[in-house]
Structure formats: C-alpha cells, structure tokens
Image (spheres, rainbow, N blue to C red):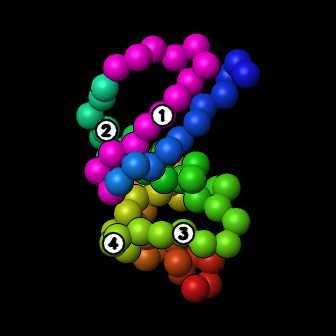
Amino acid sequence: MKNTQVYFPVSKNLALVGEFDGHAGLIDATRELVAMLNSKLLMFAYKQIYTPKIGFFFIGKSGEIHEGKQFLRDIGA
C-alpha cells in the first residue's frame, strides 16, 4: 500500500525499514532516527516491550528525546 512503512528490528544494532515507494540503500542511523523508530514501535506495542538496556531513546510528547527509564515512569511501571 502506498504511504506504508514497515519497521523490523533485527538486532540491537540493526533494523530494516521498508517503504512501498522508498529507495533502496543503507544508512547509518542518527540518535534522532533511532528515537523516532523506537517511538513508532512503542506506539503500537500491545503488552510487552523488550530491550537489552533501559537507555533506549524515544521521542516524548513534546518532541524531545528521552531515555527508556522516562518511558517507564510515564506509563507507571
């Protein structure tokens, strides 16, 4: 489907991102890109998330980058 993206975390250092009309290639992810991908995965998590470290990055409600421990505080874990 057009305007569809698929995110697939392969390992803690590698993720695949697919787009219907996207371009092929490899990119080195910035902190901001990692936070954006993590945030999208978190938005659609149903019950569980898995991470090798609590220091993963995500984008907070006001657009700033936070570490995972803040996410756990936000959800009351």
Residue 53: assigned label: 4
Q: Position of residue 8 (x, y in %)?
A: 50, 44
Q: What type is the residue that disc 3 sits on?
A: Ile
Q: Earlier in the sequence, mark 2 or mark 1?
A: 1
Task: Tell me the magenta residue range.
Answer: 12-25
Quadrant, the C terminus: bottom right
Residue 49: assigned label: 3
Q: Earlier in the sequence, mark 4 or mark 2?
A: 2
Q: Are marks 3 and 2 in contact (CB under 8 Å)?
A: no
Query: How far apart are the alpha carbons under marks 4 and 1?
Result: 22 Å
| View extreme (bottom): residue | 77
Q: Which residue is mark 2?
A: 29
Q: What type is the residue that disc 1 sits on?
A: Val
Q: What type is the residue that disc 4 sits on?
A: Lys
Query: How far apart are the alpha carbons under marks 3 and 4?
Result: 11 Å
Q: Look at the numbered disc 2 and give the secondary structure of its residue.
A: loop
Q: Which residue is mark 1?
A: 17
Q: Are marks 4 and 1 in contact (CB under 8 Å)?
A: no
Query: How far apart are the alpha carbons under marks 1 and 3?
Result: 19 Å
Q: Look at the numbered disc 4 and give the secondary structure of its residue.
A: loop
Q: Residue at x 73, y 22 (%)?
A: 1
Query: How far apart are the alpha carbons under marks 2 and 1?
Result: 11 Å
| View extreme (right): residue | 1
Q: Earlier in the sequence, mark 4 or mark 1?
A: 1
Q: Residue at x 40, y 43 (%)?
A: 15
Q: Is residue 44 above or below residue 30?
A: below
Q: Is residue 12 left or right of residue 49?
A: left
